[in-house]
Amino acid sequence: MAALRSLAFYVLFYGGSVFLVSVSVIAVIAQKRWLRPIVAKWGHWHLWCTRKVLGIAVVLEGELPQGPVLIAVKHEAFFEAIDTPRLFTDPAVFAKQELFRIPGWGYSALVYGLIPVAREEGAKTLRAMLALAKQRVAEGRPLVIFPEGTRVAQGTRPPLQSGFAGLYKLLKLPVVPIAVDSGRLYHHVIKRPGQITYKVGEAIPAGLPREEVEARVHAAINVLNAGE
């Protein structure tokens, strides 16, 4: 049954995604103001497919932040990355630079306001990334980052990437950590029914020493790990 559900999910969700990406490209050319509602619709379409087809309930514990704040999210599966535009109002997400090379999607993502992350590039690229982030803050948009840098297996606790502390210091924003336990159900070719939980942690003020902010964020985003 799980295999059939997963097959139906892939057909429905990715089929709908192809349509919405195509519409987003048209929006970028015709009416850019249409782009944000289209991206939000993509997130809601994903949630509908997750709930109705895969049989996965999604539970939120705590109040989600909005507006200019740095949001640090645990990253166990594509689930939370796709769900981001549904959770927040016009989020500006730090995303791997390689994703922006996807035809159609990449340009639409830049216009929408995602921020490319080039970890191996020089100071000039890092300055450009910071300038984009400050611009999104000036627009009143929340910044979303996956501080561990990539998807990690459920139950693991890798250290935060060094760039997180640098952004925290330079942006001078409070941080809201969010734990999510999507990996055990969603990070497989055959996805399983059950419940995915988001747990919103206490806001961490700006201006703390690096060791303290990293320790607090690391602990908060891992509270849903097995054995916690």
Image: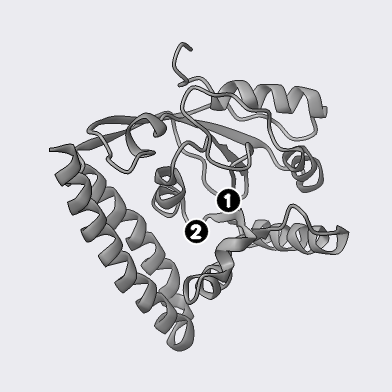
Q: Give the residue at x 63% y 25%.
A: 218
Q: Position of residue 181 (x, y in %)?
A: 41, 29
Task: Give the left or right position of residue 112, taking residue 211 as reference.
Answer: left
Tag 1 residue: 142
Residue 114 placement: quadrant: bottom right
The residue labelled by disc 2 is 90
Asked if 103 appears above or below 216 in the picture, the reply is: below
Q: Nearer the viewer, residue 74 or 203?
A: 74
The numbered disc on residue 102 is none
Residue type at numbered disc 1: Pro
Disc 1 residue crowd, few under 14, some 14–19, many 20+, Cα 10 Å? many
Q: Nearer the viewer, residue 43 or 12?
A: 12
Split into 4 quadrants, where in the image is the N terminus? Answer: top left
Please state the horizontal and vertical placement of residue 143, each as a whole percent of the image: 61, 50
Residue at (55, 62) in percent of width and height: 99
Q: Position of residue 132 (x, y in %)?
A: 71, 63
Task: Report the amino acid beneath label 2.
Answer: Asp
In the rendered structure, which disc, 1 or 2, sits on the residue that comes first in sequence?
Answer: 2
- Judge from the rendering whether residue 81 lies leftward or rightward of residue 6; answer left or right: right
The reply to whether callout 1 and callout 2 are in contact (CB within 8 Å) is yes
Q: Alpha-carbon neighbours of circle 2 within 10 Å: few (<14), some, or many (≥20)?
A: many
The residue that appears at 33% across and 70% down in the rendered structure is 18
